[in-house]
Amino acid sequence: MKLKKNIFDRLSLKKKISLNSKNKLSDQLFLESEKNIQLIEQIKDLQNNRNKIDKEFRSAYLLKSQNWYSQKLTEELDQKVTKQRFIEKELKDLQQKIAVEHQNMTKALKKANESRKKEAISLENKRELMSPKINKL
């Protein structure tokens, strides 16, 4: 005979579902962070390569286009660094929420086990009281 689920079992299931969704979100944020770090490194490499170009006689149009390109690289780098800071903050907050959620889930599981044990003990006591006692003298 299976005991019916108590409120703590349901609560622990709810916490598990929430924990799984937060873990998936955390994985996605981590992957996004990795991609962003790679893009930042690529932009920095491009900027370093731009600085190494030897200085020759250049036309005004070429200088203007190089300046525009350098400016765009700098803007893109600033955007990616800002995005990376935001992702890191979100990831940190999400990890804290995951830790709290995990603690709540383990507490709910512990309470569910205690409740099940109490129910089993009370059921055993009822069965004991219902069975007739044989008195032997």
Image (cartoon, helix red, strand yellow):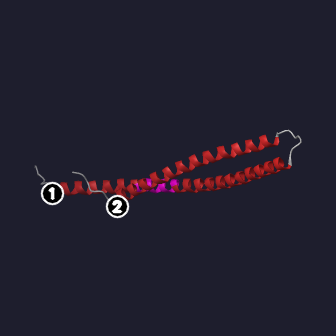
Label 2 residue SS: helix
Dominant SS type (magenta): helix
Question: Where is mark 2, residue-wise?
Answer: 7
Picture coordinates of residue 15 (x, y %)?
43, 56
Vertical side of 62 occupied by 10: above or below: below
Rounded to the nearest angstrom, the CA distance separating label 1 from label 2 is 28 Å
> Is label 1 in a helix, a strand or a loop?
helix
Mark closer to the observer (1, 2): 2
Magenta range is: 98-108
Question: Does residue 37 appear to the left or right of 14 in the view shown?
Answer: right
Q: Is residue 18 left or right of residue 41?
A: left
- In the rendered image, residue 82, in percent from the top left (x then y), is placed at 68, 55
Mark number displayed over residue 130: 1
Q: What percent of the width, then of the height, locates residue 90?
A: 59, 56
Q: Residue at point 46% right, 53% down?
A: 21
Task: Spot the residue most to the right.
Answer: 57
Quadrant for residue 87, please give it. Answer: bottom right
**Which labelled disc corresponds to residue 30?**
none
**Which of 59 and 10 lies nearest the eye of the viewer?**
59
Residue 103 inside the magenta-drawn segment: yes
The image quadrant of residue 48 is top right
How many marks overall? Answer: 2
Q: Please name whichever residue, 87 or 115, is drawn nearer the observer in this view of the structure.
A: 87
